[in-house]
Amino acid sequence: REVISPSNGASASAKPSTDPSAVQADVLQNLEYVVGAPSSKIPNGLDASSVYRGVAASVREHLIDAFNRTQDYWSEKDPKFVYYLSAEFLMGRSLMNAVQNLELTDTYSQAVKQLGYDLETLRDAEQNAALGNGGLGRLAACFIDSMATLNLPGWGYGIRYKYGMFKQAIDEKGYQQELPDIWLSNGNPWEIPRPDITFKIGFYGSVDNFKWSPGETVLAKAYDNPIPGFKTPTVGNLRLWEALPVAEFDLSAFNEGKYDKAVEERRKAEDISAVLYPNDATEYGKELRLKQQFFFVSASLQDAVARFKAKHGDNWQLLPEKAVFQMNDTHPTIAVAELMRLLIDEQSLDWDTAWGITQKTLAFTNHTVMPEALEKWPVKVLGKLLPRHMEIIDKIDQIWKDSLKEKVLAQVEEMHKKNPPKPKAAKPLKKEVPLAAKAEAGEPAEDEDEEEEEEDPVEAALNKYGIITENPWEKGVKLVNMAYLAVVGSKAVNGVAAIHSDIIKRTIFKDFYELAPHKFQNKTNGVTPRRWLAWCNPGLAALITETLGTDTWPNDLNLLTGLRKHADDKEFQKKWRAIKHENKAKLAAKIKARTGVDLPTDPLYDIQIKRIHEYKRQYMNILSIIYRYHQLKTASPEERKKFVPRVTIFGGKAASAYYMAKKIVRLINRVGMVVNNDPDVKDLLKVVFVPDYNVDWAEALIPAAELCQQISTAGTEASGTSNMKFQMNGCLIIGTMDGANIEIAEEVGKENLFIFGMDESEVPAWRESKRAEWKDYDPRFVKAIEMVRDGTFGDKEYFQDLADSVYDMKKGNDWFLVAPDFADYLRAQEEVDKVYLDQDEWTRRSILYTAGSGFFSSDRTIKQYADEIWDVVPVPVPSS
Ligand code: CRA
């Protein structure tokens, strides 16, 4: 082995070298002086984790070098910046992404090879940064990747959670277990601590004549995470905040022997950035959560405002020309009140001026129409934690309601003209609550027997659209509707796919839309084609580059349309298929290593990976597999021969308090245990649940998938983003006309997807009336439910209420339409089998999927945000 001695290599002050020998020397130096590996052990005798840390420390030098150049340049040019405020950034691993984005893959591969390692092995030594739940958090990660790649001046702002998304284990009985994610235990080479950048964050206390005296104060300390763009010297920034006590240690308490009290401050402060709430698309409603939200929002706004002030003094009217804050769902929406507070209380602006600036500086993205996920804070809780903000919100609400009055009066008069008021108002219908909401938000207080007081219709309407409203399920309890606050305080409001942006205008934000239609926009989600195609599927990436004759497609994904003309080419199809097969084999090996299950590589690989949720209908998928199993068990030898072999893979975490989701996880695992061990089944059917699904798993699963399940009840999945990742990797979709599936169908041709089920316009009527009369259960559905009930998969008792939830209308309500969609779902599944038998046709479609995926690059999404909402232009950093 050739080993270059450290002294030949990098010098402390020089720019990091890209020559493999010098890089190797640099790695050795970092191993010795950063990792602390004794030189006697280098290069042999070191474990992969240590070598990984040495390599990461070396890559970090390249990142920091370009990061400093970028940030200095932007600071000097002073362009408008976008600040992406998000409670979640689901980054995954950084080593390979950094090396590849910096175009140093060959350099580092060679350098570590000479030390006896390969980059692939080192890659696995890295912990996943799982500071997010699911789609929303991963979207934020894709967005900052695109911002850097497009040279857009901008930063992400979030929380440096000490513990990220819990680790999921599946025990031998099939239950989900949650374990803490101690992701920082080996340090984090991808961050730069900034002990000099801190802000004070206040909570509680009192307000006297508009002056807030917080009762508790903590420090927010910054950590910068450089975000490399691809084929550009630009390196962006993700600034995450850690909570620390203002006073480190109470010495007098310590001296009195009160050790607990002495460290109490520290613990109380650290709690704020300790854990990520493991809830996806659901509200959690805990005071600590609100504390987290205000903590990172206040730190980020103070930081940006301070930077503005350092450059522009008190010229606050200029703020909207220099900064825009994008609020990622309702989690950061306290920003509306905090920006007002900063401008009024700290910078002495008057209300109207501050309000004008705020409304031009903030923008809001809504990610869901699930009522339980639209955060509403009790006035009591918000008022106690943030008394000054509550005052500000009160005033915003008053002004908003005043502006509504005229419209509401006219509506009521109109209504009275058509329908003269009856002497006694009819009792409102009981609000129907999806099971998910019941499980996670707790049952609403029922006070049905109480006589309803007659309400003034104007008051009632104002209550409905007010930012502050009465809780419909709990009399006398007032709530702050954070989504409404965001809509009123923002210059733009967007949904995340065409259908979703349309639905929010008709439903949750109807009145807001009618009053200010110009605010409402659509920004269909996208994903970064670097991580989700070029890096995770090197085989396919190489074939694409060879076929298109260019390697620039990851920056210009519409070039993929050039693949269309090869879709029918048999030779090309063969190459395409071979790559898929190789990816399947790699995945099978990984699954074998992690779960012990042996998977054949010839069957159709059918994958559903996403958070476990009733609306995503993993339950419907497993019911169809249960039925398939039944068919296999009862098939004649002739029928068996016609079976199209399938490997069905699931992955996803259930929120720890989500009762039904946990049962679904268990059911899938139990079905797997039975099916995979049944000698009758052989290789015709396999059911695997990959434990601890995360970004890393996704990078292995998606390139191997041939069919993916995007089967949410129409109207419930705002967009979906795994659908786009699968599409890029040539995976066919079985799905409903929901979220971004609709736009994918437009790009690929609807006939090339396996579409089934009710569409969005049919769902409400079904829920309201048809369901009550419906008796027409498909016998195959009845059979599958029976098998859940009769103990085929063990634990009869445990699964009864899961069965009831879609079948027994007295006990459940099948809110997500599993029963009525089931027959059409099976029809689509049969169609899948039929097409899979024709491998050329399957491959033709697969090529068309990838060819039609250009629109779903997050570069396109971010360009649209920049042009249509942010008004931020690229500022490319000159190459040094
Ligand atoms: N759960 C939506 O449900 C969407 C992502 C990103 C979600 C997905 O359909 O693709 O956001 N919503 O836009 C959400 O988190 C709070 O709401 C999601 O990830």
Image (spheres, rainbow, N blue to C red):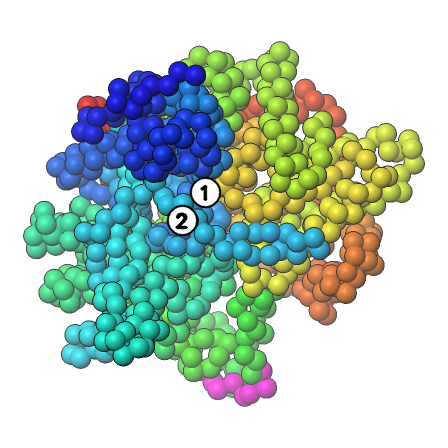
CB under 8 Å between callouts 2 and 1? Answer: yes
Looking at the image, which is closer to me, 340 or 676?
676
Residue 327 highlighted magenta (yes or no): no
x, y (%) of residue 625? Answer: 74, 44
Looking at the image, which is closer to me, 783 or 180?
180
Q: Amino acid at mark 2?
A: Leu
The residue lying at 39 percent from left, 67 percent from top is 288
C-alpha gap between disc 2 and disc 1: 8 Å
x, y (%) of residue 225? Answer: 31, 42
Q: Amino acid at mark 1?
A: Gln
- Range of the magenta residues? 448-455
Q: How many marks?
A: 2
Mark number, residue 606: none
- Callout 2: SS: loop
Residue 3 in view in this figure = yes
The residue lying at 79 percent from left, 57 percent from top is 794
Which image quadrant: the C terminus? top left
Q: Which residue is mark 2?
A: 184
The residue lying at 62 percent from left, 43 percent from top is 690
Residue 449 highlighted magenta (yes or no): yes
Asked if 748 appears above or below 346 in the picture, the reply is above
Residue 333 appears left or right of 805: left
Residue 771 in view in this figure = no
Mark number, residue 127: 1
x, y (%) of residue 430? Answer: 58, 74
- Callout 1: SS: loop
Looking at the image, which is closer to me, 95 or 298?
95
Q: Earlier in the sequence, mark 2 or mark 1?
A: 1
Residue 269 appears left or right of 571: left
Residue 798 picture quarter: bottom right
Residue 350 appears left or right of 461: left
